[in-house]
Image (cartoon, rainbow, N blue to C red):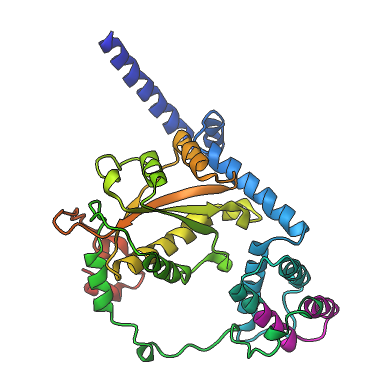
Amino acid sequence: MRKIRKRLYYFKKKIKSQIMTFCSKSMLATKIYYLFSKEFNNEMYSVMVGKNKHIKDISSNNNSYFLRRSIHRIEKGLIMKNRKEVFGLDYIYDTVQNYSALLSKNQLSEVEHQWCYDVLNNYFKTSGQNRVVEESLKVFKEANQSYTKFNSRNNSSVPYIRIKMEEKNIGTIDELLNLSYYRRSVRWYQQRPVEKNKIENAIKVAAQSPSACNRQPFHYKIFLNNPMRNKILNCAMGTKGYADNVPGVAVVVGELEAYFDERDRHLIYIDSSLATMSLVYGLEVQGVSSCIINWPDIPERERKLKSLLNLPDNQRVIMLVAFGYADENEKVAYSAKKTTKELAIFDDHNFETSIQ
């Protein structure tokens, strides 16, 4: 019986491989293949729910992601060398409408409020004459009648010229390289809690990471010495054997309601990953080690974790980050990295001799 099952297993595997080979030869065949597959169901559903929420929130002037994107688009317009006298006409009115609505509902943080106010104020001061601009300015002025403290500000959140790097005491490439060599995935930790202020400091670093149109479509759910921590770690794969000794875990959650189109569906993974690498470095320089825990797209595990975290359908778990003070007596994996030559392809042949 065991031999029969084994033969059936390999037979099915062979047939599946042949079907995949055939379907990979054309876009149409690939689409037909995935009609009978559940591999992308979770992502498709989350993208659809997120897109629907995004559009509905815009229509009700209640979309902070639209506002953040629009303000960033205005920033980019303001820094153009040969700037148009009037720009942003296709979105400026909707932008101030959202700004006004979110402000009236007290849904803007002080930092966000200052940024939006300063950029919009600068836009209206420098924009040329236009009916749409004039109508938008009226909405902007009405929205800020009750917020006079911002009217006296010196546009501190508008585009600016950076101070030269050497004057900022940022450090050297050698120091950064040494940090990257030292940082490794740590799976064994001392049994002492991580101070909350160190985590907050690392998140401040993560927040400065680049994000498409500055939407920052993610957040961190952090659990310290909490029974929930073990339940979360047990949802992941590859944590067996060391999960019980992890002092803290951060769940990186992507927010698909940040987007109006399917084309942007991958940005939750890109933007959150950029930020999380900065988070990891931010922890490491404070003496707190970490380990990125992969989160493969397995429906059963995603449903379980989303239920534990009470996440809405338009949000997806991106990855987990275990962290704590490393047990210095335990080993870390060497994990040989690819060389620069393997990772980089320069189109200028003059660089070839310098790549090692």
| Quarter of the view holding residue 57 | bottom right
Residue 270 in sight in this render: yes
Quarter of the picture holding the C terminus: bottom left
Between 8 and 53, the one nearer to me in the picture = 53
Residue 79 image point, x, y percent: 60, 83
At horizontal 29% and vertical 16% (from top left) the residue drawn is 6
Between 83 and 132, the one nearer to me in the picture = 132
Instruction: Write down the region rendered in magenta.
Output: 117-141
Instruction: Tell me if residue 309 is in the magenta stretch.
Output: no
Magenta: predominant secondary structure element?
helix
In this rendering, position of residue 132 left or right of residue 187: right
At horizontal 72% and vertical 88% (from top left) the residue drawn is 126
Residue 177 image point, x, y percent: 25, 72
Residue 266 in sight in this render: no
Quarter of the picture holding the N terminus: top left
Residue at the top extreme, as displayed: 1
